[in-house]
Amino acid sequence: MITLKVLLFFFGMVSTVSAIEGFVEKGISHSKRSEEEFHQLYTNGLISTIDFWPTLLSILFWSALYLLNQL
């Protein structure tokens, strides 16, 4: 049981750091554009600030760890 909890914690931490790293990298890259170019890309839906998979994985790992701790 403790091994499963440690693995869930480890993978939850790795996916959370990956998601945060993606947020920071995208924030920095978007801030280097001109205001007009940023507005045009944002309104056309070409700019995304959240990576779906790392965020989803971190939510799933932390939720699984929480549910496992409730047992």
Image (tube, grey):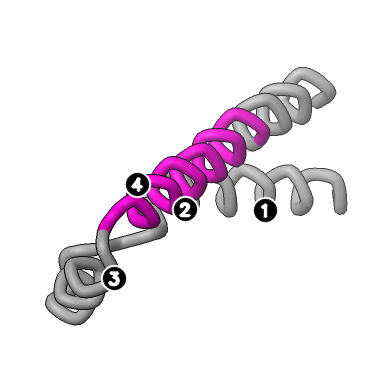
Q: Choose the circle earlier in sequence order: 2 or 3.
A: 3
Q: Nearer the viewer, mark 1 or mark 4?
A: 4
Q: Report the Cα–Cα distance between label 2 and label 4.
A: 22 Å
Q: Report the Cα–Cα distance between label 2 and label 1.
A: 11 Å
Give the residue at mark 4: 29
Q: Nearer the viewer, mark 2 or mark 1?
A: 2
Q: Choose the circle earlier in sequence order: 2 or 1.
A: 2
In this view, the residue in front, 69 or 33, is 33
**Within the magenta stretch, is there residue 36?**
no
Classify 10 Å Cα crowding around label 4: few (below 14), some (14-19), many (20 and above).
few
Residue 35: percent from left, percent from top: 29, 70
Assign the N terminus to one quadrant of the image: top right
Q: Report the Cα–Cα distance between label 2 and label 3.
A: 30 Å
The amino acid at mark 2 is Leu
SS of the residue under disc 4: helix
Q: Choose the circle earlier in sequence order: 2 or 4.
A: 4
Give the residue at mark 1: 63
Q: Report the Cα–Cα distance between label 3 and label 4.
A: 13 Å
Q: Choose the circle earlier in sequence order: 1 or 3.
A: 3
Q: Nearer the viewer, mark 2 or mark 3?
A: 3
In this view, the residue in front, 37 or 4, is 37
Residue 47: percent from left, percent from top: 25, 63
- Which residue is located at x 72 percent, y 25 percent? 4
Q: Report the Cα–Cα distance between label 1 and label 3.
A: 38 Å
Classify 10 Å Cα crowding around label 1: few (below 14), some (14-19), many (20 and above).
some
Q: How many marks?
A: 4
Give the residue at mark 2: 56
In the image, residue 47 sits, relative to residue 67, either above or below, namely below
Classify 10 Å Cα crowding around label 2: few (below 14), some (14-19), many (20 and above).
few
What segment carries the magenta color? Answer: 13-33
Classify 10 Å Cα crowding around label 3: few (below 14), some (14-19), many (20 and above).
few
Give the residue at mark 3: 35
